[in-house]
Image (cartoon, rainbow, N blue to C red):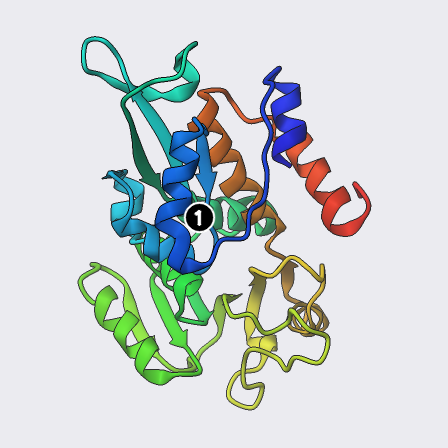
Amino acid sequence: MHNPAMAALGLNWRYLAFEVHPDNLRSAIAGAKAMNFVGLNLTVPHKLLAVDLVDLLDESARKWGAVNTIRFEGQTVDGQWQALHAFSEPRKEIRTRGFNTDADAITRALRDDLGFEPRGKSVLLLGAGGAGRVAALKLADESVAELHLVNRTISKAEQLATELKGVPGVRVSVGYPKDDVDLVLNATSLGLKKEDSLPLDSKAFSLSRARAAYDMIYRPAETPFLRAAAEADCRTANGLGMLLYQGAKALELWTGKTAPISIMREALMKNVYGSSI
């Protein structure tokens, strides 16, 4: 999605993918810095590791405890730091600033794709790992009323519940809710493979008790979880919108320009599903 967007913005830039072992992440960031890259995106497991590897953390990265976007910044003659797109010549002094664009992308996708407004709602969150943790913190920050945490390893859900205890107005519990919920959000990897089981225990919680279901997985377009949710008359959406919005925000951080969302969405649809429909 980034390359068509950069072309539309008139930028002679390229977005490339590199596979980097976690042990080599520090060297990879240093190499990109030496080659005057304008920025980087990071995925699992690099998001947590990068928190300690960048020169400066943006408020978004500090708040959510993970870095998925790095912007390289150069120093002006008067000592100010600016994104490298602002300079016509390579800079000698460059620093790395870490951002998190995932959290805002989650709630934007929920609003745009499901019409879901978090404030005052009840959410059953499946998965308390990296993605689940950021989702839980963001939903709590957006004033959900109830947050029910379910994770294969109960201790991890309990740890996240403890982290959320200080958020005023949010009731947090570990385990399946007794009452209906407004949203079930899957933040696990269950559904990536055809043979995967559902990410929740249907005997403990029926999807007929949820009004909407969101799966962070976007390929396949319809996971067994979303299929079951649709059969239970839930409104459903997959994670393509989240992928789109986190990428669009990263592009804006690097370029200082408004991301062409429609172009990026069309490119994603064609790349992921082979169609713009």
Q: Is residue 80 above or below residue 117?
A: above
Q: What residue is drawn where x is 31% and y is 35%?
A: 96
* x, y percent for residue 191: 64, 71
Quick check: 79 left or right of 271? left
Q: Quadrant of residue 94?
A: top left
* x, y percent for residue 248: 53, 35
Looking at the picture, tell me which residue is in the foreground, 61 or 168: 61
| Residue for badge 1 | 102
Q: What residue is drawn where x is 68% and y is 59%?
A: 219
Q: For the residue labelled by badge 1, is the local secondary structure a helix, a strand or a loop?
A: helix
Q: Is residue 228 visible?
A: yes
Q: Quadrant of the C terminus?
A: top right
Q: Quadrant of residue 231?
A: bottom right
Looking at the picture, tell me which residue is in the foreground, 48 or 157: 48
Q: Is residue 182 above or below residue 142?
A: below
Residue density around tag 1, few if under 14, some if 14–19, many if 20 or more, within 10 Å:
many
Looking at the picture, tell me which residue is in the foreground, 108 or 192: 192
Q: Quadrant of the N terminus?
A: top right
Q: Is residue 9 above or below residue 39?
A: above
Quick check: 124 left or right of 226? left
Q: What residue is drawn where x is 58% and y is 42%?
A: 244
Q: Residue furthest bottom?
A: 203
What amino acid is labelled 1 in the image?
Answer: Asp
* x, y percent for residue 6: 61, 24
Q: Is residue 103 above or below residue 225?
A: above
Looking at the picture, tell me which residue is in the foreground, 168 or 53: 53
* x, y percent for residue 67: 36, 48
Quick check: 12 left or right of 137? right
Q: Is residue 120 visible?
A: no
